[in-house]
Image: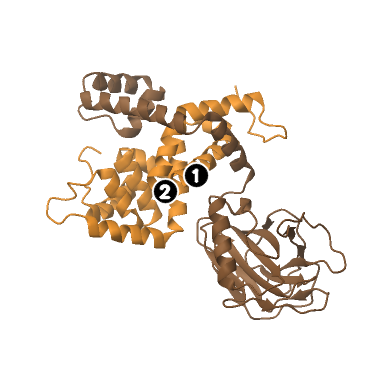
Chain colours: A brown, B orange
Amino acid sequence: MAEHVGELMLRRLRLGELARAEAESATRHVEGCGDCRARLRDLDEEQRRFQQEISFERFSAGVTRAARRPPPSRIPARVAPVLAMAAALAIGVALVPLARHGESRIKGATKGTAEVALRIAGPAGAPQRDAALGAPEVLSRGERVRIGYKPGEHKYLVSVSVDEQGVVTPLYPEQGPALAVEPEPSMHYLPGSLEFYGRGAERVIVVLSERPLTVDEVKAAAKLAYDEAHGDVLRMPELRVPGEQFHQTLLKP
Amino acid sequence: MTRPAFQVLEGGLQEEDRASLRELYERYGPAVFGRCLYLLKDRARAEDAMQDVFARAMTHLHGFRAEASPLTWLMKIATNHCLNQVRGERAGWRSLFERQERARPEGHGGPSVMETRELVRTLLSRFDKETQAAAVHYHVDEMTLEEVAALLGRSVPTVRKRLESFARISGQELRSHG
């Protein structure tokens, strides 16, 4: 072998992956080549540094967590709010509410309790559907989403979404101060419907609050939560804003 | 002997899965982490990406072990996974590219002051995903044209064409012997 052993081949030699003839040829070269021997030593050092930096326990825990989540997206998400109003409403998807600051998680809906629902509908005429609570919801191509809420004791609403690339999109309102909610305790659906583009997971967050937050406040809090989760939208923590939050992850087609 | 696909069970990993993970960690961890770090340029993100790659290997353990070169398979998966992430951050790459372009020294003779790996990484954002992958496997893994073509499932002429388009901008010509 006249030229140096390529990077990948050197690694494979070190791992014993090469076929016999290839391994013998590469080994003969390495034995006579100072540069390639130095590179092999570099690989040993790389091994040592890796195992020092990332313990097996940490590696194992991380891989186990990764095995539980869906594959990541490839294309940045864009949300297109569609102004056409939805048809007659069917039962939507109740979102999992996170706790208010300092309070325990609220489950179920009782009179006076805030609630958020996601309704999913396909192209005209296609049946609407439910989804499992507390689990990522898989969207099919062309499906659109409407966000509904019961205000409980809250007066204002802001909704944003966060995709796997960390792009935070304001859903309702698009800018400025929070929306004032309808005071009646029944379910109200926000105008229009949303179609989520791209692939992978996107987390929809609805914040109901007693004081009017701004879209920028909620966006900043969402970005921070995304960073804390190292970009894993399924593991994002609660946003550091006052009020009650509802989170639902959508898996785009 | 075959092994069952990786099952995440309540109460922790089974002994057999733990042994498989240990093997992956020791044999392939440094290479895969290094690839992820090279493309993502952030240690935390590289570690997350590495975990994704190995999670995939564990769920396809039987197929993975049947590969002629498990390392090559893992590097392909890692490269593809990280390039997908990077492509979603075009603004970030673009500004990084612009900063690095401004920092490049003037003069003839090609990028003599920059290592090949750094140059390849700097220029990746200008190309489509397949050219990116071809450039990484050819110039960084130092695979032959034939090996890159086999890995990407493309013909040698197609890969050559992609690398030639990369060479026109990078100055990294194809090696005369492959």
Q: Is A218 or A191 nearer to us in this picture? A: A218
**In the image, residue B143 lies at what x, y percent?**
32, 37
Are dots 2 and 1 in contact, CB under 8 Å? yes
Say which element carries label 2.
helix
Image quarter (top left, top right, bottom left or bottom right) of the C terminus of chain A: bottom right
Please give the label number shown on residue B49: 1
- Amino acid beneath label 1: Ala
- The answer to whether B18 appears left or right of A35 in the picture is right
| Spot occupied by residue B58 in the image (x, y as percentages of width and height) | 58, 34
Q: Earlier in the sequence, mark 2 or mark 1?
A: 2
Asked whether residue B175 is in view, the answer is: yes
Q: Residue B66's x, y, as percent?
A: 52, 29
- Report the disc number at residue B40: 2
Which image quadrant for residue A89?
bottom right
Q: Amino acid at mark 2?
A: Leu
Query: Is residue A18 something one can see in this rendering?
Result: no
Near mark 2 (Cα within 10 A), the count class, few <14, some 14-19 or many ≥20, is: many
- Quarter of the image holding residue A182? bottom right
> Measured from the top left, where is residue B48 in percent x and y?
51, 44
Q: Residue at left 68%, top 55%?
A: A136
Q: CA distance from mark 2 to mark 1?
A: 9 Å
Q: Is residue B174 left or right of residue A165?
A: left
Along the line of sight, which residue is nearer the eye, A182 or B10? A182
At 74% from the left edge and 59% from the top edge, which residue is drawn? A97
